[in-house]
Amino acid sequence: MEQFNILCVDDEKIILSALKANLELNPAYHVYVADSGERALAMAEDRYFSAYLVDQKMPGIDGVTFVRLLKEIDPN
């Protein structure tokens, strides 16, 4: 079975916990979490993710800025 890495990014830990628990009900998903845009960018530099679920409003790097910076790391 193919594995898919998914990165969830949200500054609210309860949201991250719920996303991770629900997504990992699918055995094909390996879910990573980051509680800030900064941490998520660092993770994206080290690993390929099939999908990103990103909160739009976060302190520091918000969701829109995260996506823009992510495209600089991986244009695909």
Image: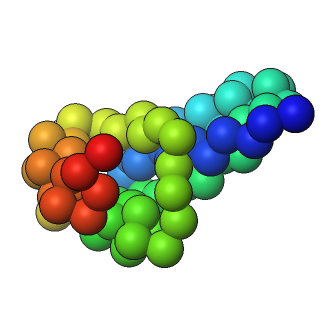
Quadrant in which the C terminus appears: top left
| Residue at the spot 80% in from the left edge and 25% down from the top edge | 26
| Residue at the spot 43% in from the left edge and 40% down from the top edge | 52
Q: Kindly tell me whether residue 47 is visible in this rendering.
A: yes
Q: Position of residue 15 (x, y in %)?
A: 52, 37
Quadrant in which the N terminus appears: top right
In the depicted structure, whether residue 12 falls above or below residue 36: above
Q: Quadrant of residue 20?
A: top right
Q: Which is nearer the eye, 46 or 55?
A: 46
In the depicted structure, whether residue 64 falls above or below residue 68: above
Q: Position of residue 54 (x, y in %)?
A: 35, 39
Q: Which is nearer the eye, 53 or 4?
A: 4
| Residue at the spot 14% in from the left edge and 41% down from the top edge | 64
Q: Is residue 13 left or right of residue 57?
A: right
Labels in figure, total: 0
Q: Position of residue 8 (x, y in %)?
A: 49, 44
Q: Is residue 24 left or right of residue 70?
A: right
**Which residue is at the far front?**
76
Q: Is residue 54 left or right of residue 29?
A: left
Q: Is residue 31 left or right of residue 76?
A: right
